[in-house]
Image (cartoon, rainbow, N blue to C red):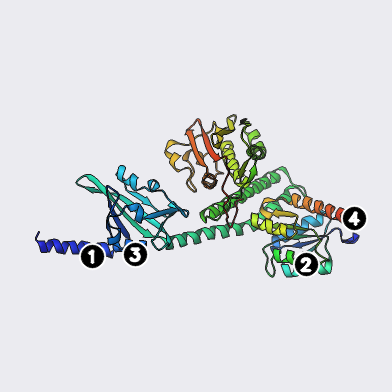
Amino acid sequence: MTEIEIRDRQEQLNAILSSMAEGLIAIDNERRIILMNQAAGILLRTAPPEATGQEIKQILAVYRDNQPLAYQDLPIEKAITERDIISIGLLDNLSVKAKNGRLFPIAMTIAPLLAKGEISGAIILFRDITKDREIDQAKTEFVSLASHQLKTPLSAINWYSEMVLEEEVGPLNEKQKEYLKNLYDANRRMVELVNSLLNVSRIDLGAFAVEPAPTDFSAVADEVLTELKPQIGLKKLRLDKEYDKQVPSINADPKLLRIIFQNLLSNAVKYTAPNGVIGLALKKEGDNVLIRVTDTGYGIPAADQGKIFTKLFRADNVRDKEAEGTGLGLYIVKAVVEAGGGRIWFDSLEGRGTSFFITLPLVGMKKKAGTRGLT
Amino acid sequence: MADANTLGKILLVEDDKFLSVALGDKLTREGFTIIKAVNGQEALAKVRSQRPALILLDLMMPQKNGFEVLAELKLDETTKNIPVIILSNLGQEADIKKAKELGVREYLVKSDVEMKTVVEKIKAELAKSVNGNFAG
């Protein structure tokens, strides 16, 4: 290649880079910027020559839920060390703060930069997804509005079937009673589903409030267990309770705590065969309260374990057994636990059972103002 | 103060026809006298002309919502002591708080409450307000 050809080629590559609509940043093994294109400069309000040579963390300020994200939590290192291409999308909820202070949501792809088989850094490609975010928000608001509208006719079905079932307008024969009871129960499930959808939309809108108040964990748990008593009795399940007396009253949002217990315990009951055992333990562990919900139920197949906190996901082995689940419960629980500053994880073996573990800090949940609460 | 012959008179404020019929039928069978209104404006007019012993009030309604009705009832000496039970599908903490600040003692969420509970709550509120009036 002649010098002129090399220069032409160089100009062509520069033209491609500066015409791209996505922001592109290349970094070396020292995590310093070796190249930044025009679009990246415009998005970050930083001139590319000014950025070159600087550490990536000085230039690309990433936020999650309006909190700065520590550099090690960014998957850049993962891309480099594991030679993996990492995609970050709408659901990851990441934003970038430009030099002028503007925070905008981003999607990004991080790929290891390979030269002669050796990793010499990474390439970061990103774009502003404000529009996508708006569409997603409109979708969520629609779900919220539609769910709410469903409540009126559902209330009507509830009330009319209740009055007929109570034989207020005349006697029923046994079959009629049975059918009406099924109608009534199915409608109650629909109300629960609508309530779950509303909760999910509030979570997705980031609009739910955390309102801590001194809360006795065991009292909330017992309340939920009392509600589940009929189902526990029907399946002849044994219930093992283990409440550590050392667990103090904690500044937690009782409604959120209720959602946690309700979902985990009703799952344990629902997904355990008759004559099985379910357990609930509350313990003080260091600076946390540990909630452990165990069952000897169907378990979560290994292949599904990575997905069970995903919205609308249901494991294969329970789809056939239990028609009732919505795939929303654990998604809601995880969001609630994390909003309360806690952690959730599980151990499960298919055919043997599942244990869910949740820790919540003894210092309590942080108050979070929100336009809506969960119900 | 409610006089004796209005004790069993309930103003049912509900804009959904099916829910209004369900509640009206149920409460009539329970022995109450029912007056109905389908919006906030009509509700206020009927409170003044009919003097109900209790108001069962929806919140989301055309021509003055339930909160506006509550605020106006509170301003009027002759209506501010009439017990109000909210029966709405708005169940948010903020809504409940707002209603309680406007003097509501009982707040029920339609889709979560059984009819027999609605009846129990009405009876309990009426019993309280009778006692309250005697005491006062």
Q: Which amino acid type is shown beneath numbered disc 2?
A: Leu
Give the distance between the C-alpha atoms of the residues marked 1 and 3, in whole angstroms.
Answer: 16 Å
Q: Quadrant of the N terminus of chain A?
A: bottom left
| Mark 1–mark 3 CB contact (< 8 Å) | no
Q: Residue at x 41, y 48 (%)?
A: A70
Residue that badge 2 annotates? B75
Q: Chain of mark 4?
A: B
Q: Residues within 10 Å of mark 4 (few under 14, many from 20)?
A: few
Query: Residue at the left extreme?
Result: A2
Residue at label 1? Answer: A15
Q: CA distance from mark 3 to mark 4?
A: 75 Å
CA gap between label 4 and label 1 equals 89 Å
- Element marked by disc 4: helix
On the rendered structure, is A335 left or right of B53?
Answer: left
Q: Amino acid at mark 3?
A: Ile
Using the image, name the chain to which the residue with label 3 belongs.
Answer: A
Res B134 label: 4
Dot 3 corresponds to which residue?
A: A42
Q: Position of residue A365 (x, y in %)?
A: 57, 45
What crowding class fits label 2: few (fewer than 14 Cα within 10 Å), some (14-19), or many (20 or more)? few
Q: Secondary structure at mark 1?
A: helix
